[in-house]
Image (cartoon, rainbow, N blue to C red):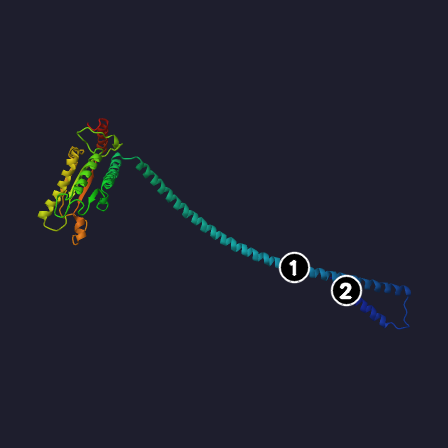
Amino acid sequence: MTDMTISFLLIVMILLAFFATQLSSQDTVPRDQFNVILNNLREARADIRRLEAERDTAITERDAAREARDAAISERDAAIQERDRLRTENEDLLTKIRQLEALVDRLQRDLDAVTAERDDLLERLSRLQQINPLEAYLAQAIEQRREILIELRERLLEQFPELASIISIQQDTLRFQGEGLFATGSSQPDTARKRAIVEAMGLVLDEILACYSLSETQEDTSSCGNNSVLVEAVQIEGHTDSVGTDGTNFPLSAARAITTLQTMVRVAPSLSTRLNWSRQPVMSIAGYGPMRPIDTNETVAGRSANRRIDLRIIMYAPSNVEEVEEIRRRLDALRAAGGSE
């Protein structure tokens, strides 16, 4: 609008100048009219300067507006980019949230399964903690048998240290391996020292069995503690290597077992009075000949290992809870009476 006004005034000035050139020197106008025209010209020039200033101001404002517009456009573009970035981040976050929710659901299912398994185990444990007397007896019997074997071996080693490489515990058996007690082909201890070993074994075993068997004789059982299990049998087992025939090996193995038992009973007579739950003698013998080797018979060392005596301890296994209670009652009665019922 300002540019149009300036252009209009320029046109007016041009027309005035044109009319002025058309006047001749002889042409005259009244002064009043001249003054009016002059004043109009001055006002037009002033208006032109004013309008030019306004135009410059408008141009400046226009340029500033354009800069502001460009800045706003840049800010808008930056805002759009930021919006797009935030939208992308938001989508990524939503994806991660969904993944985490799925993970939480899976972990919750796992936790529920573990909790259920824990509850089941706790229930089982609770049932197990309700000890079955029969199961408790059998577990105690196994533990007591091992303690008997350990005590027997340790007390023998105290008197006869040389037996360290000869006697060993094998599950329910105390094993005398090789020619520790008998020479090849013999059923008798060939030295006084070996005979002393058998005698010491009889004395120690008799003392131990006082706590794990019934007896018709009165004796001090105060050292037995609260033991409430019984030995069914102590079996002395004789073994040979494969050299020779069955006709010689079986009698030889049985003879070794018999000699061992007789030697033990000679120094500890009460061994023969130790009774099991069925009122049968606890002590027994067996001869296996070469039937149960523990090593090869193809070497000297193997055959030596197979010629042995095993002292096997068999614990009594009750058939019901009532029998367990009766065993405990009888053993308590024996201790209370000093060994006799």
**Mark 2 = which residue?**
6
**Tag 2: Cα neighbours inside 10 Å, few (<14), some, or many (≥20)?**
many
Residue picked out by circle 1: 69
- What x and y, as percent, mark residue 338? 22, 27
Amino acid type at circle 2 is Ile
Image quarter in which the N terminus is found: bottom right
Bin the neighbour count of mark 1 within 10 Å (Cα to Cα): few under 14, some 14-19, many 20 and up. Answer: some
> For residue 298, which quarter of the picture?
bottom left
**Residue at x 21%, y 34% (from the top left corner):** 207
Quarter of the image with the C terminus in it: top left
Q: Nearer the viewer, mark 1 or mark 2?
A: 1
To which quarter of the image does residue 128 belong?
Answer: top left
One can see residue 56 in this view: yes
Q: Is 219 left or right of 41, judged from the image as shown?
A: left
Give the residue type that dot 1 points to: Arg
- Residue 52: x %, y % from top left: 77, 63
Q: Position of residue 239 (x, y in %)?
A: 15, 46
Kindly state the secondary structure of the residue where label 1 is placed.
helix
What residue is drawn where x is 17% and y is 50%? 304
In the depicted view, which residue is nearer to us: 206 or 45? 206
Say what secondary structure mark 2 lies in: helix
Front-most of 188 and 5? 188
Number of labelled discs? Answer: 2
Q: Is residue 316 visible?
A: no
Give me the C-alpha separation between circle 1 and circle 2.
27 Å
State whether residue 73 is above or below residue 198: below
